[in-house]
Amino acid sequence: MYAEERRRQIASLTAVEGRVNVTELAEKFGVTAETIRRDLAVLDREGIVHRVHGGAVASQSFQTTEFTLDDRFRSAPSAKLAIARAAVEHLPPAGGSVFLDAGTTINALADLMAENPAADQWSVVTNSLPIALSLSARDLDSVQLLGGQVRSITQAVVGDTALRTLALMRADVAFMGTNALTLDHGLSTADSQEAAVKAAMVTNAHKVVVLCDATKLGNDYLVSFAAIDQIDVIITDSAAPEPFIEALREREIDVIIADAE
């Protein structure tokens, strides 16, 4: 296992369980305690965990830091592709309608949709400039990009125009990304305008499918845009801690674990 992947799993475990122990982590990952200490030092510098004697504890603050699209595309690419492949199974039948939220995992799903023979028969609405450009470049005509202001860091369309348009729409399935997911705060993100568009998609869809790699689990961002009970399906990866998965399933959410090939 690469160091980046190990740190990703450590971050997720810390967020969900609240505290991790160096010795237990070393046994779990089959590395030395010194390697784990270096991992925790890196995660501490990044503000993901707080180092304490013998291990680390989860950061308790609501996060506001956003990463660029390039950084997001580089983060956990194999997990995101596996999640996108699993999400294909939840696309509506030909002729159905889909909301595609802005996000790199959703972008991976859009690429897979474009390769599907039924692609031209879906009505797609998105607030993601990269997704709209990607789908239209593949000669798909039934793609609507919401109007409004484009946020430079995420290239997502936000604002009153997008919200007014969404208020008139309904979709069979909304595929949603998120910066974070907790049991009490639900789905959350850093920006209130982006959260408003996400919330409108969730509200106006018959089925909500969340594409969420394990690094998002147990973390909190500033603005909540959907409660846990608004989610029908969560697709995550094999690094997701089992106690958190069990807690989601106890709330009658269909949790799917996508294994990277």
Image (cartoon, rainbow, N blue to C red):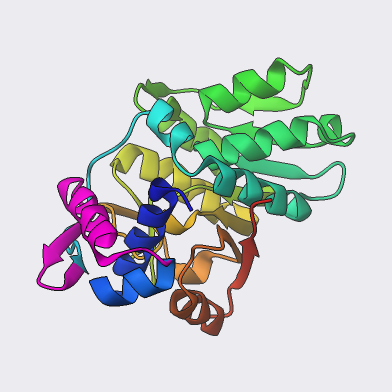
Residue 46: % across, % down:
20, 45
Q: Which residues are magenta?
A: 30-56
Q: Quadrant of residue 64?
A: top left
| Identity of the residue drawn at 54% across and 40% down | 77
| Residue found farthest to the left | 53
Q: Is 261 placed left or right of 16 in the picture?
A: right
| Identity of the residue drawn at 64% across and 66% down | 256
In the image shown, does 70 or 148 lie closer to the viewer?
70
Establish if 25 lies above or below 67.
below
The total number of labels drawn is 0
In the image shown, does 204 or 7 lie closer to the viewer?
7
Q: Is 83 placed left or right of 59 in the picture?
A: right
| Identity of the residue drawn at 66% across and 40% down | 109
Could you tell me if residue 101 is visible in this image?
Answer: no
Residue 44: % across, % down:
17, 53
Residue 90: % across, % down:
74, 55
| Magenta stretch encompasses residue 199 | no
Q: Is 117 placed left or right of 72 in the picture?
A: right
Establish if 139 lies above or below 238.
above
Q: Quadrant of residue 139?
A: top right
| Identity of the residue drawn at 38% across and 49% down | 3
Could you tell me if residue 65 is visible in this image?
Answer: yes
